[in-house]
Image (tube, grey):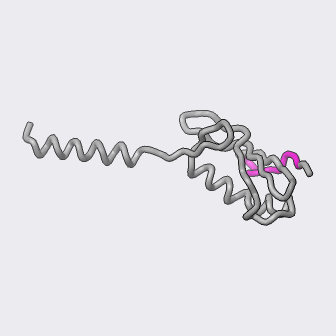
Amino acid sequence: MPIFIKVLCLCLLVNFSVGCSHQTVVSGSFTVDKDDYDASVRQLSERASFDLSCSKEKLSFIVLETFGGTMTFVKQMGISGCGKKAVYIHHKETGWVLNSTQS
């Protein structure tokens, strides 16, 4: 096999493996898909800010439960800020729903 074909195959393999990888983030004791985590935080920030009467900048997020599978997605998110806590559950049909709060 000519050297340029070997180099071409190697380049394609490297590009394919880099393009197929996904990033993860660790939250609590879970490793979850980074895009899903970031989307969950974006979706919940405004709502949690309202529910907890706390500015978005003061909120902390932690994954409490996940949907399993090859890539792990956020199912429950705990949010705290301004001395209050809330738990939101993601339902596939309805989206994020407030499950409980604590002052």
Image quadrant containing the N terminus: top left
What secondary structure do most residues of the magenta stretch adopt? strand
Q: Is residue 97 magenta?
A: yes
Q: Residue at x 31, y 48 (%)?
A: 15
Point out residue 70 in the picture as x, y percentages from the top left corner: 54, 34
Image quadrant where residue 24 sits: top right
Image quadrant where residue 28 sits: top right
Image check: 4 left or right of 24? Answer: left
Point out residue 17 in the picture as x, y percentages from the top left corner: 36, 43
Q: What span is in magenta? A: 93-101
Q: Residue at x 77, y 47 (%)?
A: 78
Q: Nearer the viewer, residue 4 or 85?
A: 85
Point out residue 38 in the picture as x, y percentages from the top left corner: 62, 54
Could you tell me how many numbered marks the image carries?
A: 0
Residue farthest to the right, as pictured: 103
Q: Residue at x 58, y 45 (%)?
A: 25
Q: Residue at x 63, y 34 (%)?
A: 68
Q: Is residue 55 magenta?
A: no
Judge whether 43 appears above or below 91 on screen: below
Point out residue 80 in the picture as x, y percentages from the top left corner: 80, 52
Image quadrant where residue 66 sits: top right
Residue farthest to the top, as pictured: 69
